[in-house]
Amino acid sequence: MTRSFARAIAALVCITASACSNGALPPESPGSTTPAVSFAQQLLAAPKRRLCPDALPGEFQCHGIVNELTIDIADRHKSCLHLPGCYAPSDLQTAYGIVRPAIYRGKSMTVALVDAYGYASAARDNARFRRVFRLPACQRSCFEVIGQTGGPPPAAQDPGWDFEQAIDVDMVSAICPNCRIVLVEATTPQTSDFVTAELTAFKLAHVVSNSWGGPEAYSSGGPFDHHPGIVVTASSGDSGAGSNFAGSQASAQQPCSFVGVVCVGGSSLVLRNGRRIHEVVWDDLIVRQCTSGPCATGSGCSSLVAKPSWQHDKGCTGRSETDLSADADPNTGVLVAYAGQFYSAGGTSVSSPMIAAMYALAGNTSAAAPARIWAAGANKRSGAFNPVTSGSNELGAVGTFVCGPAILYICEAGTGMNGTYSGPTGWGTPTGLSAL
C-alpha cells in the first residue's frame, strides 16, 4: 500500500469516526423527532477548542480539548448521554472491562493530579459530577486540593487550566470512584514549579497523573525517572506526530518520553451499550475541527532519551512514545462537570488520568510499570490489550510526513511489532487490568 493511499484511507476513517456512524447513533423511529440524536449530531459537527495555548519556552501546556456546547443531562432535547462525545463513567468502565473493580477496589489508593494554577470550584464541580452519575460521594477526607509545596492552593486562576483540572478529577472519579484524590496545583506552568509539585505528589500518592507536556529538552527525567513505589503517567500530546517536527523524525514530548513515565496516547472509541465496536487512532488532522490547529494523539521517537532495555522495537533508537492508550478523541469523548454545567471533553488529558486510575484499581505501585506494559504487549496470548491497528497521526500542520521508513510505525498503526505496537496508541487500550 502506498503512503498516499494509506492517508486516503486514514482520512476516510477519520471522517467516518467524526460522523459517528458505525451504528453508534440509534435509528429514528417512525414519527419521532429524535431530539437527543439531533443534539448529538450538532455536538459532533461543532468546532473543538484547546484549553491551553502553546507553551512558552520553559513552560508546559495542558492537553485538554473542549466542545463549547453545554449539555443538559436532564433535558432530552440537549442530551447525548451514552453517545459518542458524551460517555459517562458507566460507559468507560464497561468499555475497559473494569466494572467490578470500579465498585469494590481503590479504597486504599491515592491518585495525585498535578496541574497549574488554582481551581476554586474543584470540589463543588466534582461533587456535581459524582451526584449526577451516582458515584460514591467524596467527602473532605478523600479529596484534597493543595499548592505545589503542600500548603494552600495558589490564588491565581486560569480558565483553561481550571477546565483541565475538572477533566483530571472527573476521569479519576469515573474509573476509580473509591480512590482518594489529591489535586496538586503548581503556582505556574513553568518547569521548576511543576517539578516542585511533582515531588510533593510523590509524597502523598501511589499513582501520579500529568495531563500536560512540551517539546523534549532533557536526556533524563530526574524525579520523573526515580520514584520507587509510585506509578507516573503522562499525556502524549494532542497535535499528532508532526507537532515537534525534527527533520525526518517525529520527536517525542516530555515528560511522556522519560523512561520512568507510562506514556499514554489516545484512541477514537465508538461504543454501543458500553461495548467497544470500533477503535482507531485518534486523528482529526484532516477534518481540522480544532479551532487552534490540527488535533491528534501525539507520538514520537526521542532524540534525547536513550532506548530503555524493555523496549524492543526496531527503528527508533531512542525512547519510543507511546506505551498504551485510552479514549481521547473529542468526537468520542467524555462528559465533564465544570462551572455548574456539563461539557464534552477530549484530548490526551482524558486518557492519562483514566490510565492512572486503572493502575490504582490494579493496586500497582511499581515504578517499573512501563516495562510491564511492554512485556504484556509482546505476549500475544496475554489478551491484556485491545490492539489498535488502524489509523495514523502523521500528517503535520504543513502537510508533511514526519516518519521515515525506519520509524513508520511511530506514526502508522498496524506497522510495528507483531502488527500491533504503534507510536500513536502503543500496545493498544486496556482489556481489564492484567497489564497494569
Image (tube, rainbow, N blue to C red):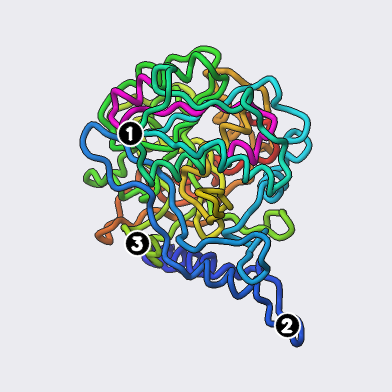
Residue drawn 69% across and 51% down? 91
Amino acid type of disc 2?
Ser
Q: Which residue is mark 2?
A: 32
Disc 3 versus disc 1: distance between alpha carbons?
Answer: 28 Å
Q: Which residue is mark 1?
A: 302
Disc 2 versus disc 3: distance between alpha carbons?
Answer: 34 Å
The C terminus lies in quadrant: top right
Residue 251 in which image quadrant = top left
58 displayed left or right of 109: left
185 displayed left or right of 435: left
Q: Which residues are magenta?
A: 171-196
Nearest the viewer among 150 and 412 is 150
Residue 408 x, y percent position in the rendering: 39, 48
Amino acid type of disc 1?
Ser
Q: Earlier in the sequence, mark 3 or mark 1?
A: 3
Is there CB contact under 8 Å for labels 1 and 2? Answer: no
Mark 3 Cα-neighbour bin, 10 Å: few <14, some 14–19, many ≥20:
few
Asked whether residue 175 is drawn in magenta, I would say yes
Element at label 2: loop
Q: Is residue 153 visible?
A: yes
Disc 1 versus disc 2: distance between alpha carbons?
Answer: 53 Å
Foreground: disc 3 or disc 1: 3
- Could you say which disc has been placed on residue 291 in the image? 3
Asked whether residue 354 is drawn in magenta, I would say no
Residue drawn 68% across and 61% down? 74
Name above or below for residue 393 compared with residue 322.
below
Mark 2 Cα-neighbour bin, 10 Å: few <14, some 14–19, many ≥20:
few
